[in-house]
């Protein structure tokens, strides 16, 4: 075999190895969007611009004013370069947790706010992602939607270290906003209640297993809770979305009973169900 043949084979082998080995996180086109998704491609991380960002606005979200005020205040502090907290939004499904984060992005994007969505499976790469944006002038929210972990998932420890306790802390231009249907983020079992201890004066102390499961949630500096809507709140949200789609007050009043039946059939009076009804109802009207 000639030397040239050996060199050619070696170069082909190197090319194949380079294709499968992890690569440093590449610089995206930051001007392409105000929102990005972090994805794994062939073992390497990629920041992909979101071409069509959700257009939801703060005014579109009704019956969550206390939650809206708290998240807005924290986000305004962050964008202004003042101290702010990582945020965990928890509670009933379909009540506007994710929508509120997207609305905050649209509100503060002109002031330099950017959002990076990361799936929980990719949270192990969070330190690399934070390093990539550390020198950028923008302010970044790392968004983890519908966050929860099973036992032993690697992303759990990466997120826990980044929130608090790691030598390599996140830069001051990065915050983590996460949504979850449960506050403690890890599954809890009845048998774990046996690890609680009681003192003579009546104090209750959780065991090590329970402490570990609540420690991640406690690392979020701000908890914002969402609750199921009453019928009156649900109807107010339906009316707001019907106005959004251009219907008049007479049509909105006429939709009341049908919207209640819709919620009954879905088994929920959530904001998501109200929005879905409004889309269906408005789509059947000649407006």
Image (spheres, rainbow, N blue to C red):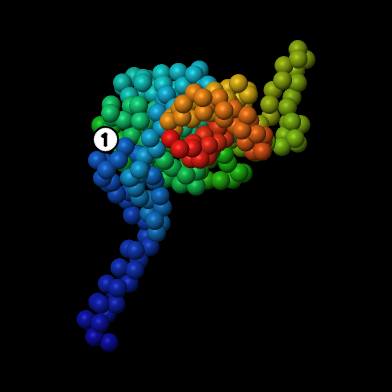
Q: Position of residue 272 (x, y in %)?
A: 54, 34
Residue located 64% across and 38% down the image: 266
Residue located 45% across and 38% down the image: 286
Which quadrant holds the C terminus?
top left
Q: Is residue 234 found left or right of 52 in the rendered image?
A: right
In the rendered image, the residue lying farthest to the top is 201
Along the line of sight, which residue is nearer the eye, 35 or 190? 35
In the rendered image, the residue lying farthest to the bottom is 1
Label 1 sits on residue: 136
Viewer can see residue 213: no
Q: Position of residue 186 (x, y in %)?
A: 61, 37
> Looking at the picture, does residue 4 appear above or below residue 162?
below
Along the line of sight, which residue is nearer the eye, 287 or 196? 287
Q: Position of residue 182 (x, y in %)?
A: 60, 33
Along the line of sight, which residue is nearer the eye, 178 or 243? 243
Viewer can see residue 119: yes
Quadrant housing residue 196: top right
> Looking at the picture, does residue 240 appear above or below residue 52?
above
Residue located 62% across and 26% down the image: 228
Quadrant housing residue 177: top left
Q: Position of residue 241 (x, y in %)?
A: 48, 30
Judged from the image, the secondary structure of the residue bearing numbered disc 1 is loop
Residue located 36% across and 39% down the image: 53
Q: Is residue 212 found left or right of 243 in the rendered image?
A: right
Q: Residues within 10 Å of mark 1 (few under 14, many from 20)?
A: few
Which quadrant holds the N terminus?
bottom left
């Amino acid at each position: 075999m000639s030397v040239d043949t050996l060199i050619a084979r070696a170069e082909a082998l190197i090319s194949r190895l380079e294709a499968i080995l992890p690569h440093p996180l590449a610089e995206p086109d930051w001007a392409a969007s105000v929102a990005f998704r972090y994805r794994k491609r062939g073992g390497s991380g990629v920041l992909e611009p979101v071409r069509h960002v959700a257009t939801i606005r703060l005014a579109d979200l009704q019956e969550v004013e206390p939650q809206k005020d708290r998240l807005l205040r924290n986000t305004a502090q962050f964008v202004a370069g003042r101290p702010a907290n990582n945020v965990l939004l928890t509670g009933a499904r379909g009540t506007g947790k994710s929508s509120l984060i997207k609305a905050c992005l649209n509100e503060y994007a002109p002031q330099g706010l950017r959002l990076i969505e990361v799936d929980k499976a990719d949270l192990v790469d969070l330190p690399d992602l934070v390093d990539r944006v550390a020198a950028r002038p923008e302010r970044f929210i790392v968004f983890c939607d519908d966050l929860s972990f099973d036992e032993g998932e690697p992303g759990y420890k990466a997120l826990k270290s980044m929130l608090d306790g790691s030598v390599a802390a996140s830069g001051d231009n990065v915050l983590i906003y996460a949504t979850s249907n449960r506050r403690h983020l890890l599954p809890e079992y009845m048998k774990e209640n046996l690890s609680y201890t009681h003192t003579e004066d009546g104090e209750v102390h959780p065991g090590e297993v329970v402490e570990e499961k609540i420690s991640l949630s406690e690392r979020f500096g701000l908890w914002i809770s969402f609750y199921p809507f009453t019928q009156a709140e649900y109807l107010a949200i339906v009316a707001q979305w019907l106005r959004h789609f251009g219907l008049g007050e007479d049509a909105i009043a006429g939709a009341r009973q049908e919207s209640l039946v819709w919620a009954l059939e879905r088994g929920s009076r959530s904001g998501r169900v109200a929005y879905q009804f409004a889309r269906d109802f408005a789509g059947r009207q000649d407006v």
